[in-house]
Image (cartoon, rainbow, N blue to C red):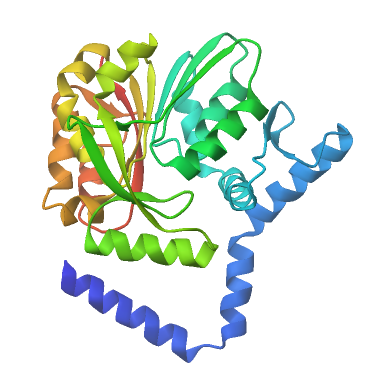
């Protein structure tokens, strides 16, 4: 598998070197045409509705107000106009009324859930990174609805009393490791943000939900490789509660912790989870062989 990956990368590099750079720029532009179309559509709706420039429209009925922070503002726009993930999330979220956003960062998915629900809902956004939590609070203030209970919890999810991680100053927080430290430090420098090592309190997912009176029917988990620990520690609770799950899997980070991403997937399969779109588990196991992150939309079998 590794030899095939190296060979494939070598072929791509050779082809790229033999073709003019202008061709690749044109190809990238064509690949992003759908993104530019969604940007223009949002701007047109914004003008038609005489809305402020501090918001974006995913469609005529779905508006998100953007954070004040410039970096988070750009991240929100990128996530909104690269629409594949949030569209699959909304399909998964259909009918759900209690959302727990684990690794909420600036709160894009929390705000999306709030904006897409006409009925009364609960949102619990869990984010231990202090700079990201400032953005999250701003996003909550700007996107709060009258029928929404939206709670922010600043603890990390885990069974230990404390957790240490590195922060890029917004958007990236990873557990301590030489590779994670170096990558996070580069991200912070590129964005002009302070790099920091942070220690925070931990609590289990079950106890955080119980403390805030939230019984989730939907989870989003995006915690930079720590999903292995979270899921493994919560298997009995997940099997009992059976919430739907939008899970970001980070195979490379899991392996750096000397753990196997296949074990994570196998555990979820064993307690009755399956893909929301009906895809076989075999496809997820195959993707876990690589290093690229991927997301799964999961529902529990009835």
Whether 146 is drawn above or below 132: the answer is above
How many tags in the picture? 0
The residue positioned farthest toward the bottom in the image shown: 18
Residue 31 found in image quarter: bottom right
* 42 lies left or right of 157: right
* 153 lies left or right of 231: right
At horizontal 38% and vertical 82% (from top left) the residue drawn is 13
- Residue 220: % across, % down: 39, 31
- Residue 213: % across, % down: 38, 8
Residue 157 found in image quarter: top left
- Residue 244: % across, % down: 35, 22
Along the viewing direction, whichever of 183 and 220 lies nearer the viewer: 183
Q: Quarter holding the N terminus?
A: bottom left
Along the viewing direction, whichever of 133 and 297 lies nearer the viewer: 133
At horizontal 25% and vertical 78% (from top left) the residue drawn is 7
At horizontal 37% and vertical 60% (from top left) the residue drawn is 184
Q: Is residue 88 visible?
A: yes
* 141 lies left or right of 9: right
- Residue 162: % across, % down: 23, 36
Whether 53 is drawn above or below 1: the answer is above
At horizontal 32% and vertical 47% (from top left) the residue drawn is 224
Q: Is residue 108 visible?
A: no
* 89 lies left or right of 209: right
Q: Quarter holding the C terminus?
A: top left
């Amino acid at each position: 598998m590794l030899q095939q990956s190296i060979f494939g990368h070598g072929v791509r590099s050779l082809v790229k070197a033999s073709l003019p750079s202008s061709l690749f720029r044109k190809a990238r532009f064509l690949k992003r045409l759908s993104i530019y179309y969604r940007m223009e559509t949002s701007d047109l709706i914004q003008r038609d509705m005489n809305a402020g420039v501090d918001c974006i429209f995913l469609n005529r009925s779905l508006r998100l107000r953007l954070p004040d922070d410039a970096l988070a503002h750009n991240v929100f726009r990128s996530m909104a106009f690269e629409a594949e993930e949030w569209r699959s999330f909304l399909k998964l979220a259909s009918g759900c009324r209690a959302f727990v956003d684990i690794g909420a960062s600036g709160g894009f998915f929390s705000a999306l859930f709030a904006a897409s629900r006409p009925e009364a809902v609960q949102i619990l956004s869990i984010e231990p990174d202090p700079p990201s939590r400032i953005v999250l609070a701003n996003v909550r203030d700007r996107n709060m609805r009258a029928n929404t209970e939206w709670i922010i919890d600043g603890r990390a999810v885990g069974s230990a009393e404390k957790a240490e991680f590195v922060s890029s100053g917004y958007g990236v927080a990873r557990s301590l490791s030489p590779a994670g430290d170096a990558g996070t430090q580069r991200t912070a420098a590129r964005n002009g943000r302070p790099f920091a090592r942070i220690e925070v309190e931990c609590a289990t997912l079950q106890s955080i939900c119980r403390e805030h009176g939230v019984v989730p029917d939907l989870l989003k988990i995006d915690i930079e490789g720590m999903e292995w620990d979270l899921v493994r520690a919560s298997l009995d609770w997940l099997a009992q509660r059976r919430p739907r799950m939008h899970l970001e899997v980070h195979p490379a980070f899991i392996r750096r912790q000397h753990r196997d991403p296949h074990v994570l997937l196998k555990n979820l399969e064993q307690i009755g989870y399956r893909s929301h779109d009906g895809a076989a588990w075999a496809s997820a196991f195959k993707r876990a062989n690589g290093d690229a992150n991927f997301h799964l939309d999961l529902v529990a079998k009835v």
